[in-house]
Image: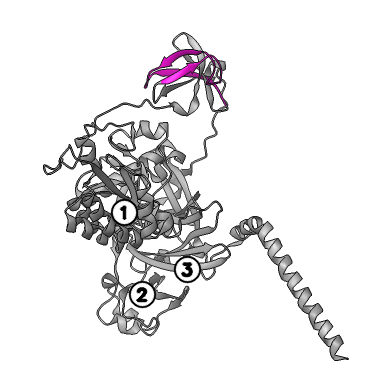
Amino acid sequence: MSSTLKKKKIVLYVALGLLTIGLGVFILFFTGESHKEKIKEELIFENLSNKKEVGRMSTLEDRNGNIYYKINYPVVGKSKIDDFIKNEVDVLKDNAFVENRCDCDELNTYYFIDYELYMGMNRTLSLVLKEVVETSWLRESVNVYTYIFNIDNGEYLSNEDIFEDGYKEILTKYIFSNDDEKFKVVIKEDKVYLIVNGMMQEVEGINDYLRLDGTIDKDYKVEDLEEEYNLINKEYIVLNDVVLYKEAKLASDVIGSVKKDEIVKVYRQSDKGWSLLLTQDGVAYIESKNIEEKKEEIPEENTNSGDSNEVKLYTVTDLNMRSEASSSSELLDVIKSGEEVIMISKSGGWAQVQYKDKIGYVSASYLTEVKIVKREVKLNVPPQGHIDPSKPMVALTFDDGPNTKATPRILDTLEKYNVRATFFDLGSLMLRYPDIVKREAKLGEVGTHTYSHKNLNLLSAEELAEEIRLSKEASMQVLGYEPKLLRPPYGNANANVRASITDMAIINWNVDSLDWKYRNKDLTLNEIDKFGNLDGKIILMHSIHNETADAIEILVPDLLDRGYQVVSVSELAYYKGYTLETGTIYYGFK
């Protein structure tokens, strides 16, 4: 073959190769979304089996901004254990949201948690959580966490509770570290296992160091469970007043009782006439003949007359009532805030309502099922005497914290210049970093950013109440008092949210620093400068970014040099002459 022909052939191959690559890029670009959805459906948890020996599985599945998440976690029926597990799952999820959330139009991150749950020796319960983060098509991280509980009292067991001195020397044969956090211990049956690189591996020679009794109850043996006990995980109705037994035999100790018509949760049932329950007091057994499976109730068909279409609602602001579904139509009346109307129909953002003896149209977005009651919010932080009401003042606010790196740096700057700020913290992170929260309260004030950063507008009434309850409990546990200021995630607080928050003022902002977007101190400072006069304004920032801490080190002295007093939200409202009330969203104080 001539050299010329060889060259032509090489050129042809190169051209074909480039064409193939170009076609691949074209297909990837135009089919990326569908391919991404396919991958989401096919994602599995490698190296984590489906062993869920006790409890029922609860699932959280939703989208949070650019993050799709699906979380499986167990509910075993003992509140102390269940509360611990739910808190751990929420903390993991919240941290993942903070680390992976971005202002993206497309869904580009997938977050998963799945679990294994084992009965162990000496009435212990072992939990394995596996966390997987997928970014686009590439695996970003895989983390495994393990927990062991005393099933009778619900206490979490640390390594020191489980092992005598000397256990670390054996464990380092499997994990080359003396950092106690690296030891991921699982107790299964009558053996001890470690999670190493996502795989469960039995540890030889460790049983001699166990503080626990190295035997297990016969009823928990895997072979017995597989042969005699079936996993049930259903609710049963108690047919008679009966007692609960410590063991699956009539001669064992009586440890409690249940009344007729009570509902109990049965997790396992044997073919020898016994059902296993996990009660608030631990494991208990009941004779299966005394219970009956609870059947799902089928709701009756709605047979009410046409009047059932009328729904009583309340206005959340003064609202114009029009003759037609158009803002240019005749004004029939002005309905005062909090007034009751009857909604007849709803279409295209307009609601046809009856108000007194008139029928007309109002904007549907300003109607709520719950009447908004205005109540004064008594502030936790008293106003400071050194503030001069005649001089300009501005409030710095920080969301999404606390964070172990950025937040202390921000607090250092506040302390250095003797200024105050308001921190809207996540309840789940408050529980994890209480010392930082206490310092925030000392150098400013602490409000709530809810417990787990859920979009309140998308929650049911029950879910909203639970999110608020958990955030209050976190504040009580860490600070000893409930928050009086709420910063809703994403600034979202629709009519139903405002009506449901009956003891906190809702605080948003009128200056967005965009620190979460830029992650650059200079761009963040430039963004704030665009707003000009800052007197009476509330600046939104986030206490989880080191770049924000960098910006604060420059911003605070600059504000002071320009004559501003840097104050908390409560101080800003007080000295600007505002009385904070529930049911109102505050963006700033002029």
The amino acid at mark 3 is Val
Mark 2 residue crowding within 10 angstroms, few (<14) / some (14–19) / many (20+) = some
Q: Which of the two labelled residues, at mark 2 and mark 1, occupies the earlier sequence position?
A: 1
Span of residues in magenta: 319-347
Q: Residue at x 49, y 59 (%)?
A: 111
Residue matched to label 3: 142
Q: Which of the two labelled residues, at mark 3 and mark 1, occupies the earlier sequence position?
A: 1
| Residues at marks 2 and 1, CA–CA distance in whole angstroms | 25 Å
* Residue 364 vertical position relative to residue 491 in the rendered view, above or below: above
Q: Say which element carries label 1.
A: helix
Q: Do the residues labelled 2 and 3 touch (CB within 8 Å)?
A: no
Q: Is residue 344 magenta?
A: yes
| Residue with the most extreme left position | 385
Q: Which residue is drawn at 42% across and 34% down?
A: 494
Q: Residue 55, position in %: x, y?
A: 43, 55
- Between residue 553 and residue 48, name the one nearer to us: 553
Q: Is residue 250 visible?
A: no
The amino acid at mark 1 is Lys
Residue matched to label 1: 80
Q: Residue 398, position in %: x, y?
A: 31, 51
Q: In the drawing, what numbered circle is on residue 182? A: 2
Q: Which quarter of the picture shows residue 490?
A: top left
